[in-house]
Amino acid sequence: HKDIYYKRITSVPAQSAFTGHATDFVNLFTDNWMTTPSNVLNTDFKLYGTYDDAINNVNAWTWCNYNDPTVGFPRDCGPSGYVPSQWSKSGARTWVMEVEGTPQEIANTCASQDDSPYVDNVSV
């Protein structure tokens, strides 16, 4: 899939919750797609194939796998089953991550990641 929309449905975990392979929230996507902390499909987030589906909460994906160190988002997740080898890895593929929300929502999310090397100079 070229476009995948990740929609968070629970709060982003605090930086202190990242004690395993994933070192921070961004690292979940770049290198270590794990279930912990708080990263389970249709419990903590939903995946969609289009922006409109994500906005309208329709056609959420139903299948995802995780917990393979050094393999990033979305591993082999798919709309209804296994879709192999579409994961990301730092430095190995070109990809873009965009964040949508009000300035306050984004600042609050970044504040929970205050020790993250990926968060810099967020202001509202």
Image (cartoon, grey):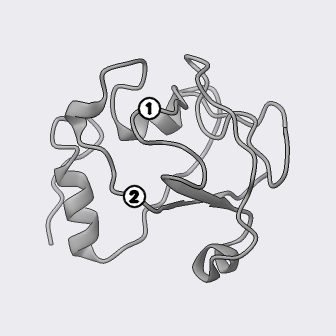
Q: CA distance from mark 1 to mark 2?
A: 13 Å
Q: Which residue is located at x 37 percent, y 18 percent?
A: 20
Kind of residue indicated by mark 2: Thr
Instruction: Look at the image and tell me in which quarter the C terminus lies.
Output: bottom left
| Percent coordinates x, y for residue 35 in the rendering | 51, 33
Question: Is 42 located above or below residue 85 in the figure?
Answer: below
Q: Which residue is located at x 55 percent, y 26 percent?
A: 91
Q: Nearer the viewer, residue 87 or 10?
A: 10
Mark 2 crowdedness (10 Å alpha carbons): few <14, some 14-19, many ≥20: few
Question: Is 76 located above or below residue 71 in the figure?
Answer: below
Q: Nearer the viewer, residue 74 or 95?
A: 74
| Percent coordinates x, y for residue 29 in the rendering | 51, 38
Nearer the N terminus, badge 1 or badge 2? 2
Mark 1 lies on a secondary structure that is loop
Question: Is 56 located above or below residue 103 in the figure?
Answer: below
The answer to which image quadrant residue 99 occupies is: bottom left
The answer to which image quadrant residue 75 occupies is: top right
Q: Do the CB atoms of the residues marked 1 and 2 lie less than 8 Å apart?
A: no
* Dot label at residue 36: 1
Q: Is residue 44 left or right of residue 20?
A: right
The answer to which image quadrant residue 71 occupies is: top right
Q: Is residue 77 left or right of residue 38?
A: right
Mark 2 lies on a secondary structure that is loop
Q: Which residue is located at x 67 percent, y 57 percent?
A: 4
Question: Is 121 located above or below residue 59 in the figure?
Answer: above
* Dot label at residue 10: 2
Kind of residue indicated by mark 1: Thr
| Percent coordinates x, y for residue 78 in the rendering | 79, 48
Count the marks: 2
